[in-house]
């Protein structure tokens, strides 16, 4: 990239690699600062240079909206250093011509104004102020890389004081010149007040850029934060009062027996409840198993299993027995044991048809069932 004052448009120099989708532009832009020091840097919407650039963007125009401007603002404010404003874009040409590139000023405070564009608030040095006051420089020029597919600026590189605007319709520096020539009545006092307010808002979580006005939404957020702090402070005061009252009370005073029970009594009561609960559970389990054996829902050989299950999960055992069907053969098995005892007949041959059916349902052989029956 090179800059020469002998070219038709010396401050609208565009450089881009042929195989790249990103171009860079040093574009001189005419622009008017307002009386509060804000200056327009880039216009809103579609715009192009007076010489017809950009030639490498479809439609031949750059484009900037609120979203694109917010990206530029966020990047600049996240950087450690302020952005430079030089003279005639000498920062871009110093490697070629070997001349120094003194700064005219610096900027980081930026804001988007709908329908107008991107505005900055420069911090001018003394020499630049004299140039502006004397009308020796009238325009501000931005340098930015951009996406060649969309024409959207990707970031801000720098800016420069120039006298050849690259875009028609931008505002000149006359308002800033008038401001610099008009002494302020209380400049230091006003700045101190604004800075104090900005720091106060920051403590409430409201970040306000230097020189930016407080929006309605930010004002409501600040009030909400103050209300929250007030509520927390009142709660803290009440707790402090209660703590002080407790400290002032007699630590040796006996508690009211109508309201408080000694811990030993509570512990003993809990132990008794646990014992009674275990006894009740054991009695209920014994009754459940005895009834199931009597009505044929539970084999004697299954008693140990049923007792283990009942001690661990009484509800599960109840569910099993509720679904089990009472079998007459099993019931008969409980009542006929005495009559059949002492007989020398084959235990398998003595099984009735119903008992064999029970053995089959239990998944046992006739011999296994006969052996269990004899127990």
Image (cartoon, rainbow, N blue to C red):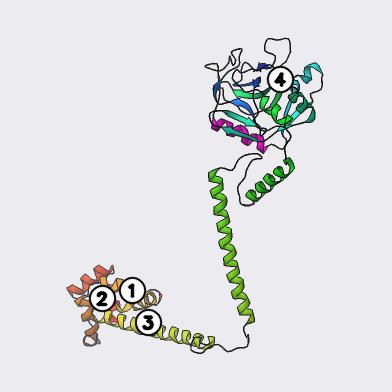
Which residue, given by chain and number where applicable, does mark 3 sit on? 281
Q: Is residue 83 visible?
A: no
**Residue 13, image x, y percentages:** 67, 16
Q: Which residue is mark 2?
A: 297
**Quarter in which the N terminus is drawn:** top right
Tag in front: 1 or 2: 1
Give how far across and how far down residue 91 sits, in percent. 75, 23
Q: Which residue is mark 1?
A: 317
Where does the C terminus fall, quadrant-wise?
bottom left
Report the side of 322 relative to 6 (left or right). left
CA distance separating discs 1 and 4: 95 Å
Q: Secondary structure at mark 4?
A: strand
Quarter of image, res 250:
bottom right
Query: Label 2, label 4: how many angstroms apart (C-alpha)?
Result: 105 Å
Q: Kindly indicate whether the residue at mark 3 contacts the one at mark 4 (C-beta within 8 angstroms).
A: no
Question: What is the span of residues highlighted in magenta in the rendered image?
Answer: 64-81
On screen, residue 42 versus residue 270, left or right, reads: right
Considering depth in this image, is 37 or 73 the residue closer to the camera?
Answer: 37
Lower sequence index among marks 4 and 3? 4
* Residue at image point 53% right, 45% down: 217
- Nearest-to-viewer mark from 1 and 4: 4
């Amino acid at each position: 990239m090179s800059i020469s004052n002998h070219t038709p448009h010396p401050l609208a120099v565009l450089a881009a690699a042929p195989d790249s989708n990103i171009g860079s532009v040093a574009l001189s832009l005419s622009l008017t600062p307002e009386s509060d020091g804000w200056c327009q840097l880039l216009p809103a919407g579609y715009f192009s240079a007076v010489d017809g650039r950009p030639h490498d963007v479809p439609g031949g125009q750059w484009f900037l909206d609120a979203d694109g401007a917010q990206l530029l603002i966020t990047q600049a404010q996240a950087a450690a250093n302020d952005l430079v404003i030089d003279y005639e874009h000498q920062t871009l040409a110093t490697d070629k011509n070997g001349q120094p590139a003194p700064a005219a000023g610096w900027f980081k405070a930026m804001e988007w104004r709908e329908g107008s564009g991107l505005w900055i608030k420069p911090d001018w040095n003394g020499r630049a102020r004299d140039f502006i006051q004397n009308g020796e420089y009238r325009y501000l020029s931005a340098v930015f890389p951009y996406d060649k597919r969309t024409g959207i600026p990707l970031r801000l590189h720098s800016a420069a004081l120039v006298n050849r605007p690259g875009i028609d319709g931008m505002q000149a520096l006359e308002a800033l010149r008038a401001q610099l020539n008009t002494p302020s009545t209380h400049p230091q006092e006003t700045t101190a007040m604004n800075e104090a307010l900005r720091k106060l808002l920051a403590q409430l979580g409201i970040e306000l850029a230097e020189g930016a006005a407080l929006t309605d939404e930010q004002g409501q957020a600040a009030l909400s934060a103050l209300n929250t702090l007030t509520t927390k402070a009142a709660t803290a005061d009440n707790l402090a009062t209660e703590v002080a009252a407790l400290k002032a009370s007699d630590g040796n005073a006996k508690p009211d027996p109508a309201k408080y029970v000694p811990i030993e009594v509570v512990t003993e009561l809990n132990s008794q409840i646990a014992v009674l609960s275990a006894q009740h559970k054991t009695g209920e389990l014994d009754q459940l198993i005895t009834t199931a054996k009597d009505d044929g829902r539970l084999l004697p050989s299954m008693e140990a299993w049923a007792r283990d299950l009942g001690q661990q999960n009484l509800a599960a055992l109840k569910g099993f027995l509720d679904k089990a069907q009472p079998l007459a053969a099993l019931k008969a098995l409980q009542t006929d044991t005495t009559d059949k005892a002492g007989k020398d007949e084959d235990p398998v041959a003595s099984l009735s048809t119903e008992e064999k059916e029970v053995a089959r349902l239990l998944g046992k052989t006739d011999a296994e069932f006969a052996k269990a029956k004899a127990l």
